[in-house]
Amino acid sequence: MTSLPLLEPDTQTICCPPATPALGAEEAQRRAVVFKALADPNRLRLLSIVKAADGGESCVCDLTEPLDLGQPTVSHHLKILVEAGLLHREKRGTWAYYSLVPGALDDVAGVLTAL
């Protein structure tokens, strides 16, 4: 049996230029935190409730009943949304009020569009 000769690749011609990623590693890591925060149905519902609220803000006391979750669980989800840069938290007396960070949802949509 005869073996076929090995062909050497043509190093003079590059078929395709190397692709440049739209996101660098650091940016992708930062954006992944936001998408992980959005990946939970309860957190999506919280964003929806806050966005639809009169004045664009909701008290934490008004967010437990619609989700049928306890206050500690709702607070945990809200903390994740704040850390992801999607919600802003303002303490007023004993209550915390949450509002959307201006432009945060547009930024998320822009990341997807740019991919």
Image (cartoon, rainbow, N blue to C red):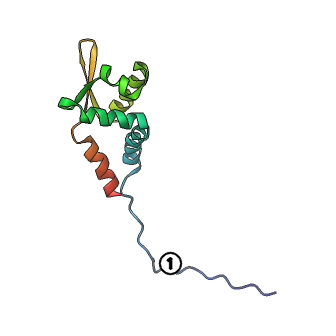
In the picture as drawn, the residue positioned furthest to the top comes out as 94
Q: Position of residue 86 (x, y in %)?
A: 30, 36
* Depth order, front residue of 18/71: 71
Mark 1 lies on residue = 11
* Depth order, front residue of 51/89: 51
Label 1, residues with CA under 10 Å away: few <14, some 14-19, many ≥20: few
Amino acid type indicated by mark 1: Thr
* Depth order, front residue of 19/5: 19
SS for tag 1?
loop
Q: Position of residue 50 (x, y in %)?
A: 27, 32
* Residue 26 can be seen in this image: yes
Occupied quadrant, residue 114: bottom left
Q: Residue at (52%, 81%) from the top-left corner?
A: 10
Q: Position of residue 97 (x, y in %)?
A: 26, 23
Q: Position of residue 82 (x, y in %)?
A: 33, 30
Could you tell me which quadrant the N terminus lies in? bottom right
115 over 37 or under it: above or below: below
Occupied quadrant, residue 44: top left
In the picture as drawn, the residue positioned furthest to the bottom comes out as 2
Occupied quadrant, residue 21: bottom left
Residue 106 is left or right of residue 20, and the answer is: left
35 over 66 or under it: above or below: below
Q: Residue at (28%, 43%) from the top-left corner?
A: 105
Q: Residue at (34%, 53%) from the top-left corner?
A: 112
75 over 45 or under it: above or below: above
